[in-house]
Image (cartoon, helix red, strand yellow):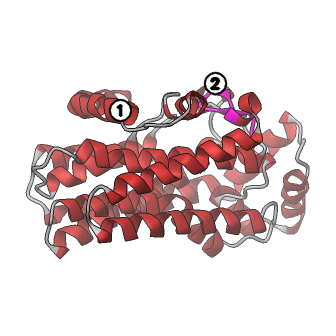
Amino acid sequence: MKDLKREILSMVEKDLKEIEIALSDNLNPYLNLVSDVAGHILFAGGKRLRPLLMVLSARICGYKGRYDKIFSTIFEYLHAATLLHDDLVDGANLRRGKPVANSIWGNSTAVLVGDFLLARGLSIAAATGKPKVIKIIAGITEDMSQGEIHQLIRKGSPDLTEEEYMEIIRRKTAVLFEGACRISACIANAPKREERAVSEYGYNMGMAFQMADDLLDYTLDTGALGKEVGADLKEGKLTLPVIYALKEADRNDRLRMEAIIKNKNFPARDFKLLIRLLEKYGGIEYTKESAKNHIEKAKKTLLVFKPSKTRRILEYIADYALSRKT
């Protein structure tokens, strides 16, 4: 996978550099404090996957303009806004290996800068001059908010269903991936067939990416993960590995798992026990297979387009999303 990552990075190096410049140039805050807080989350080593997918999707749809990098910043600003808000709601300590913004500048500042980033994304969407783009971005922000609210309502509930989990991650994560790819088709004036193809690619990528991300909480150490191991569980977030294992477990093991889930300060030995039970009842393997199915669907949608370097990059990114380690 390291070789695949290096291959992808070598193929998109120019795009990533231009996206980085656009993120800085188009932030345009009025106050230095906004720049400091936004920069803390925006320039802390994010993958730029969402803006990159937007740029690549625009290219595969035949976009010939010069504004794809500018428009791609919409999705990183929206994503950064949700991270600022999420860290506060979840009571997180680390993000990308650094202290969360609200622990440095305070809760009020973190919330307001998150609001600014949402507004900045909408302003750039308006600059496209396309009502359809504005409508898609507005819909994404609504979906992401409702996904967070749904997750908050069901926080720490051991009876969270797989269907609910799928709906939460669709709203929280997949709609942003889907929207990034769909808007590419809009600014390229691509035919409906191509718009559907890149939209479905983005949706399936988003679903798989979140499932793979949820798996990392049970397979990595803090240094690699960039946040405390077991943080999702301590924050009351039940993800697919746990949901599936709870459903499959016998009564005694289910009670053991529920006891660990309910204890927000569970010791390391209990977390290791939970991982063994997730493996015993197939929670980790089931999540891997579910993510793999979405990746296969994502790659299949690209067959609408002729073979090209851009299609190959999008296929590589799909493969890497499934097996990434960070």
Q: Amino acid at mark 2?
A: Gly
Q: Position of residue 325 (x, y in %)?
A: 50, 35
> Which circle's residue, 1 or 2, is located before the other in the chain?
1
Residue drawn at the location 78% of the way across and 62% of the way down: 155
Q: Residue at x 63, y 24 (%)?
A: 223
Residue mark closest to the camera, 1 vs 2: 1
Q: Helix or strand or loop: what does disc 1 sit on?
A: helix
Instruction: Give the Cα distance between marks 1 and 2.
Output: 31 Å
- Position in image of residue 72 (x %, y %): 33, 47
The image quarter containing residue 84 is top right
Q: Which residue is mark 1?
A: 25
Residue for badge 2: 223
Q: Is residue 263 left or right of residue 91?
A: right
Q: Is residue 118 above or below residue 31?
A: below
Q: Quadrant of residue 303?
A: bottom left
Q: Residue at 84% across / 63% down in the picture?
A: 254
Whether the magenta-drawn stretch holds residue 94 is answered as: yes
SS for dot 2: helix
Q: Position of residue 219 (x, y in %)?
A: 63, 38
Q: Residues within 10 Å of mark 2 (few under 14, many from 20)?
A: few
Q: Which residues are magenta?
A: 92-101
Q: Amino acid at mark 1?
A: Asp
Local crowd at mark 1 within 10 Å, few (<14), some, or many (≥20)?
few
Q: Is residue 10 magenta?
A: no
Residue at the limit of the structure toward the front, as seen here:
30
Vertical side of 59 occupied by 186: above or below:
below
The residue that appears at 59% across and 51% down in the rendered structure is 115
The one of 116 and 17 positioned closer to us in this rendering: 116
In the rendered view of the protein, which quadrant contains the N terminus? top left
Residue 126 picture quarter: bottom left
